[in-house]
Amino acid sequence: MNAATIAVSTFDAGDYNSSFAVLGTTGEDFEAFGATFGEGEVGAVFSTAVGTFESLGGTGNGGAVTGSGTELALRDGSVYGRANTVPTGGTWFLDSNDTWGMKWVVDIGSAFNKLSFVLNDGSDTGAFLRIIAGGASEELRSGGQLANGNARRVLVDFGQEVTTAEIILGNFTTSGGKNFRRNDGFSIDGIAVSAIPLPASVLLLGIAVGGLGWAGRRKARNSST
């Protein structure tokens, strides 16, 4: 089994928005959810076009938190450095709500091999935000705290076709450590999962089967006349 690779780079809004939701990807920017449900916690498990999200645990507190502080939250506008990143002109994003972080089970109903998303405002008040996917892990910082409102593009390449994957976005107290830390909120936005098209052989088989069915129906009609 091939191990995944995780690449983190500075987010460029113009470049990312031009490639977001291109043909062959399933996208999620949380705009429709925000317009429908408004701002607030999203429940124990939040289902989207790109899979489900849930909190890793921990109860956030303080001015950045909405509701109970135990669930992820849809947020609008700007929240202590977190803000919409995709699409340009949008306002909504999914916020960690100062919990320990997020577990995302990726599922688009078909095979995929790559995905990308934007993390905003991570690792700016002490935590080490770690991305774990497909046997690989990458921390947002290895040195000092990042700037308030920083935005990072994350690209995960699984190196093979998969139909589901678990991604952990967790805040830890130390680099490489095991203990979680709360109250260093971050947000996720602009998710794009690259679907793998059906092989040409499968498409041809579908055409052939369809042709046989059409021929059978035509023969039946001819024999009944």
Image (spheres, helix red, strand yellow):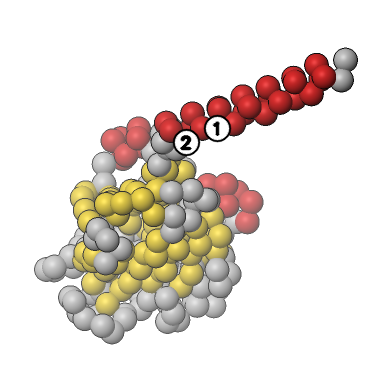
Q: Can you see residue 97?
A: yes
The amino acid on which the numbered mark 2 sits, given as a three-letter code, is: Val
Residue plotted at (48% across, 56% down): 107
Tag shown at residue 116: none
Residue plotted at (23% across, 66% down): 137
In percent of width and height, residue 102 lies at 41, 69
Residue extending furthest toward the left: 143
Q: Can you see residue 41?
A: no
Which residue was labeled with disc 1? Answer: 206
Q: Report which quarter residue 163 is drawn in.
A: bottom left
Q: Nearer the viewer, residue 97 or 63?
A: 97
Q: Cβ–Cβ below 8 Å for labels 1 and 2?
A: yes
Residue plotted at (42% across, 31% down): 200
Q: Is residue 178 above or below residue 138?
A: below
In percent of width and height, residue 185 lies at 36, 68
Q: Secondary structure at mark 2?
A: helix
Residue plotted at (39% across, 38% down): 20
Which residue was labeled with disc 2? Answer: 202
For the residues labelled 1 and 2, the Cα–Cα distance comes to 6 Å
Q: Is residue 15 above or below residue 178?
A: above
